[in-house]
Image (cartoon, rainbow, N blue to C red):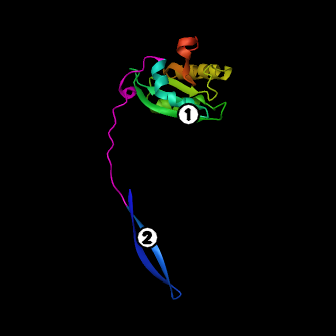
Amino acid sequence: MNATTQPSEYELNNNQLRVRTIKAIYESHQVKEEEKTWLTDPIVEGGQVYEMFKHLENETKEYFIALHLDAKNKVLCKDVVSIGSMTASIVNPREVLKTALLSSAAGMIFIHNHPSGDPIPSNEDRAITEKLKIAAELFNIRVLDHIIIGQDTFFSFKDRTDILY
């Protein structure tokens, strides 16, 4: 957007007041970017998800995100479920599943970060993963993984626990 200024004059009690008026001029720009492969390629392993959300390692608050997937594990949408504090975020299975049902998700992957940098899951992380899996099964939605992002590393529930089996 460009702006131009033009002087305008107004009278005020026999004194002259000079005012500049700013007029906005709008321009349209087209930006072309390469298509993100995670929009077209199926997600097959936790490392792909980590690369997509690696930027969360720099956040000072805990983010909990749900990726909704179609039957071929392609991303339908990303749902930022909760932005919490430095040590916790509130995740309600009802809210997670409401958006999954609206997007007609066949599967889900959960992602959250640990601002401390340590991706090892807490007892609360394990409990919410189990609750979400049980709730999703009621609607025939597969929970494929829960990735915890730490500093330069990640933890995959699918690869390192038996909760998702």
Viewport quadrant of the C terminus: top right
Does residue 77 appear anywhere in the picture? Answer: yes
Residue 81 image label: 1
Residue 57: x and y in percent read 56, 29
Residue 127, quarter of picture: top right
**How many numbered discs?**
2
Q: In terms of secondary structure, what is the magenta stretch mainly?
A: loop
Q: Is residue 165 visible?
A: no
Between 140 and 55, the residue placed more toward the observer is 55
The image position of residue 36, as x and y in percent, is: 37, 30
Left or right: 75, with 128 as reference point: left
Left/right of residue 155 with respect to residue 140 in the rendered view: right
| Mark 1 residue element | strand
Category of crowding for the residue at label 1, using alpha-carbon neighbours closer than 10 angstroms: few (below 14), some (14–19), many (at least 20): many
- Residue 15 placed where, x, y %? 51, 86
In the rendered image, residue 136 lying in the magenta stretch gets the answer no
What amino acid type is highlighted by mark number 2?
Thr
Is 35 included in the stretch rendered in magenta? yes
- N-terminal of the pair, mark 2 or mark 1, is 2
Badge 1 amino acid: Val
Looking at the image, is 135 positioned above or below residue 82? above
Per the rendered image, the range of residues in magenta is 25-45
Q: Residues within 10 Å of mark 2 (few under 14, many from 20)?
A: few
Outermost bottom residue: 14
- Pointer 2 residue: 21
Q: Position of residue 157 (x, y in %)?
A: 56, 16
How far apart are the two marked residues, 2 and 1, measured between alpha carbons? 44 Å
Q: Residue at x 48, y 30 (%)?
A: 101
